[in-house]
Image: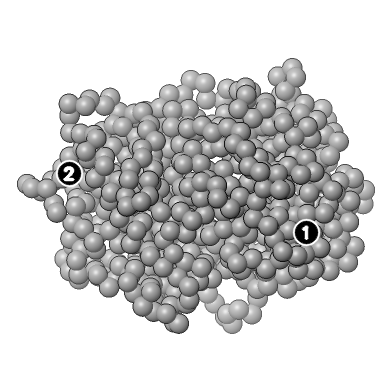
Amino acid sequence: MPHVKSIQQAAISPDASRVAYVVSGQLTVLSLEDKTSHSIEVEGKLEQRDPVWSPDSKQLVFLADLPGEAPSSQLWTAPADGGSPTKHADLKGNVDAPSFSPDGSKIALLFIEGMPRQSGPLQPMTPLAGVIGEKIYEQRLATIDLATNTVTQVTPGDMYIYEYDWTPDGQSWVATAAHGNGDANWYIARLYRIDAPSGEMHEIYAPKLQIAEPRVSPDGKNVAFIEGLMSDEGSTGGDVFLVPISGGKPKNLTPHIKASPSALTWTGPDRIIFRENIDGKSGFATVSTSGAVQQLWSGEESVSHASFAHDGATTALIRQSPSTPSELWAGSIGKWRQVTNLNADIKPAWGAARNFHWTNSNLQPEGWLLLPKDYDASKKYPLIVNVHGGPSAACGAHWDSHFMGPQSAMGYFAFCPNPRGSYGQGEAFTQGNVKDFGGGDFRDIMAGVDALLKEYPIDPRRLGIRGHSYGGYMTMWAETQTHRFAAAVAGAGLSNWLSYYGVNEIDDWMIPFFGASVYDDPAVYAKSDPMHFVKNVKTPTLILVGDSDGEVPMEQSVEWWHALNTFKVPTEFVVYPHEGHVFFKPADSRDYAVRSLEWFEKWFAKPDAETKK
């Protein structure tokens, strides 16, 4: 596979003159006027992240991470013109999201003092030991005075702050927050206003679902945010809402759009621009405070880290597609120009991409299909179905050198469907699998497979399915419902809802999807439970999981492996030490991908004599 340079973060200066971006932990500042650039170096050549501009565009704040198992970071500022950076603080613990106060005199940030591991449920969990629940590490809002370098913990010690935004006068913030364990309670976070001098918190809004992206209006009177059915912190989708900063009834500004907003920015006193997934594509739209929505742009590519200059029109963002690795672009929406050439000589090792639509019942799901490399319509090819995680997420048009790209390079069709429950077609579509996991979403996926079989030369004897998290669950579920797949790969799959409910670290996520806990309504879980139907499984299955996974603990994979072994189903089980729900060690990530490919290669070489039914 081609080795690309990936841009992790990017931010445009308020005056639209420069862009800061991060590649492999190295922070670079690029002039948009004369195209010159300079790298920012700190003592020890530490990995840098989270660059944010000062309101006057004269300096940057960023974090530099110290090596070691326990998180520890330094906070630095650097002049925009290339002068020497200044260190302002050493912070022992997990640090995120620095931002300048409106007058540029202070930095706010999120800080978990003394945290022994990286925060978040995707990270490897700390093994249980001692008195459980005795110590909770809360993420607090802190400030650093740039004149004195004084660090002040502002918010109470019993509240976990997830996201925040300054008010224009710099005297307060709005934030999403919840009491208790931060990994679990994002799903029940509420919206608060925080007084800067005292740290006192005032509740603004208690949502029905999950909320993200709180943003204060330029006049300081209102707060815009996204509310919807979300299954992972950071994977955002829903509708754009507006609520007075003093509290009151919220207004849904986008109740009927057939898209899923994921990030938003105020670009005027009554105008909000939001980034969205729209029918599997990336897009931008604007909505007024009265609720008038206007589509600005959409394209068959992936767009991330979009930031806006003060003029409300000039943007910088990272763009990529299945045929083009990530690069930095800048300009007005839809009229960007490429400003980096980090991957100019990189070409994909796989086939062309298609945004594929089909019909199931009264719905029109879509997904992304990679054709086999050197595709020849006169030949028959295997197909691998790649079910995304979530379920509140979506497959997009991005550069994939980990799964779908290699599948195509090996001569397979690679398909990533967006069934009901996914983002991209509005909130009603995203809520389409509520109390119905493995029902309509599974039927959508299989209808997509059938539509592909009619349109492309796919060998029905050589169908495979794989996925991780919700995709791992759907893989386990699929092999209990059909024998059409020749091979399956279940990564961090959920096999038994009852036992899962008792051992996972984020049980609050299930209530919006099922309406009650598994203890209060076991029947609604049982009908979606792979273990209830495990005797039906005949498909050879590779099972992969990290031993420190908190979102879908390793025991779920152990149960599935044990059951398949009991019923003599060909299976292989691999546990990766000290990995969480997401794999962070490059060697483990590569091994996971290669084992998956080898598993399909092995079983595709042994197709049944007749098509499986």
Q: Residue 444 carries which label?
A: none
Q: Can residue 535 be seen in this view?
A: yes
In the picture, measured across the screen, residue 140 lies left or right of residue 527, that is right
Q: Position of residue 16 (x, y in %)?
A: 76, 29
User: Considering depth in this image, is 35 or 198 the residue closer to the camera?
Assistant: 198
Residue sitting at the far right: 147
Q: Quadrant of the C terminus?
A: bottom left
Q: Position of residue 408 (x, y in %)?
A: 31, 34
Q: Can residue 76 be seen in this view?
A: no
Residue bearing the label numbered 1: 244
Q: Residue at x 54, y 33 (%)?
A: 298
Calculate the distance from the C-alpha at mark 1 to the C-alpha at mark 2. Answer: 56 Å
Please name the amino acid that badge 1 sits on: Pro
* Label 2 neighbour load within 10 Å: few <14, some 14-19, many 20+: many
Q: What element carries label 2?
A: strand
Q: Position of residue 396 (x, y in %)?
A: 46, 41
In the picture, measured across the screen, residue 352 lies left or right of residue 42, that is left
Residue sitting at the far top: 34
Please name the amino acid that badge 2 sits on: Pro
Residue bearing the label numbered 2: 460
Tell me: residue 484, above or below residue 510: above
Residue 366 occupies quadrant = top left
Q: What element carries label 1?
A: strand
User: Considering depth in this image, is 146 or 19 the residue closer to the camera?
Assistant: 19
